[in-house]
Image (cartoon, coloured by chain):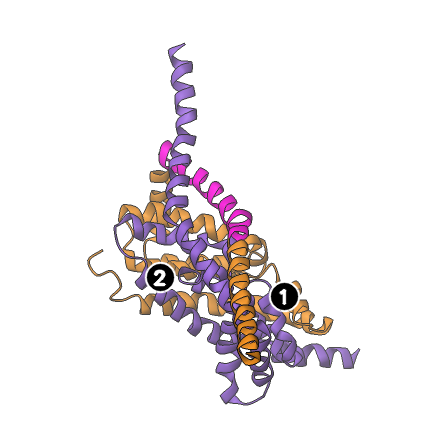
Amino acid sequence: MDFLVRLAEGFIGLFQQGGEVFVSLVTGIVPLLIILLTFVNALIALIGTERIDRVGEWAARPGLVYYPVRYILLPFLSVFFLTNPMAYTMGRFLPERYKPAFYDAAVSYVHPPTGIFPHINPGELFVWLGISAGITALGLSVVPLAVRYLLIGLVVIFIRGIVTEILTSRMWSSVHTDAEGA
Amino acid sequence: MKALNSFLTKLGRGVGNVVGTLYQSGREAIDQVIVNILPFMAFIALVIGIILKTGVGDWIANALAPLAGNIWGLIIISIICAIPVLSPLLGPGAVIAQVVGTLIGSTLIASGSMSAHLALPALFAINPQVGCDFIPVGLALGEAEPETVEVGVPAILFSRLITGPVAVILAWLASFGLYPGY
């Protein structure tokens, strides 16, 4: 009988612990999140998402100068204003050969800014929150980590865009010669 | 009098517009929290609760420490997650990245067995597969032709094999001076 009681206590204990974690997440993170989401939603509604269409047209131009526009500025503005997954619709302004690279850059930027701008991807916050919880547990501020995550993310998507663009053009030509040979 | 009236009407409309936008933004924020954020918090709280209570956490920390506790291990994790056959399987909903992130954050980093500055490369190491499950849909959102999708999928998947580890190394270089002493 004692054994059964202890077993039941252990069983319930698992969920009591989970409940405490849940309460600390809800009281620690959710209030800030709601206010921040409200602010950013209002900001986006007041600015209007149609304004970044012009950046899309601008990014479509060829030439080295436009690489940072295409793989840093456009992905950043797209995920900030349109969020995941509507950000990828901005690819429609680009020529076909840039579309995979743009998607690669944009989709790679739906997590790095979430430490500061959680509205970008509210359903997948724990990529950031999971790791940053460890920093919080040490009693340190997560903001320095969030800022570096956001900035390095920009460098990473830039590299990703360029590498994917090169691979796309290589595969493109091989697929097309195959098609002509057949 | 007429001028005053039209001014007041304009003012009223403007204020009404802003207040309406703010209220709508609040409504969206609450929706996002209820639909996207709270369910995942419940799931993560259950996982953390079980980990903490059963002592599985120590076991996981010991198993992960040689892999995730240093930069070489993080690079290896990023290469594994970026393998073109695995990456589309690991992608959906970023669930794998979020669970692994939580494990690393709440066991290794929180316990101090992984230095705090490695949180930055870890954020990239757990996530080179981001969006790999979504490439055809993401490209379709950008109105890409079927031929572009055919080339784009392998181009992005192979690009990740290069840019995944590169991102970890960059983040590692950028993590120096973050949280000195931890």
| Label 2 crowd (10 A; few <14 / some 14-19 / many >=20) | many
Pick the quarter of the image with the N terminus of chain B. bottom right
Main secondary structure type of the part rendered in magenta: helix
Pick the quarter of the image with the C terminus of chain B. bottom left
| Label 1 crowd (10 A; few <14 / some 14-19 / many >=20) | many
Rendered residue at 42%/68% (across/down): B167
Location of residue B162 in the rendering, given as x and y in whole percent from the top left corner: 48, 69
Rendered residue at 30%/65% (across/down): B175
Q: Same chain for the residues at labels 1 and 2, yes or no?
A: yes
Badge 1 vs badge 2, beta-carbon distance below 8 Å = no
Magenta highlight on residue B47? yes
The range drawn in magenta is B30-56
Q: Nearer the viewer, residue B31 or B148?
A: B31
Residue lying farthest to the left in this orientation: B181
Location of residue A74 in the rendering, given as x and y in whole percent from the top left corner: 53, 76
- Identify the residue position indicated by label 1 in the image: B138
Residue lying farthest to the right in this orientation: A182
Give the chain letter at badge 1. B
- How far separated are the C-alphas under marks 1 and 2? 27 Å
Q: Of the residues shown, which amino acid type is indicated by label 2? A: Leu
- Identify the residue position indicated by label 2 in the image: B120
Let me know if residue A44 appears in the view. Answer: yes
Residue A150, placed above or below residue A71: above
Let me know if residue B90 appears in the view. Answer: no
Secondary structure of the residue carrying tag 1 is helix
Q: Nearer the viewer, residue B128 or A57?
A: A57
Which hue belongs to chain B? orange
Give the chain letter at badge 2. B
Could you say which chain is coloured purple in the image?
Answer: A
- To which quarter of the image does residue B5 belong? bottom right
Secondary structure of the residue carrying tag 2 is helix
Q: Nearer the viewer, residue A96 or A22?
A: A22
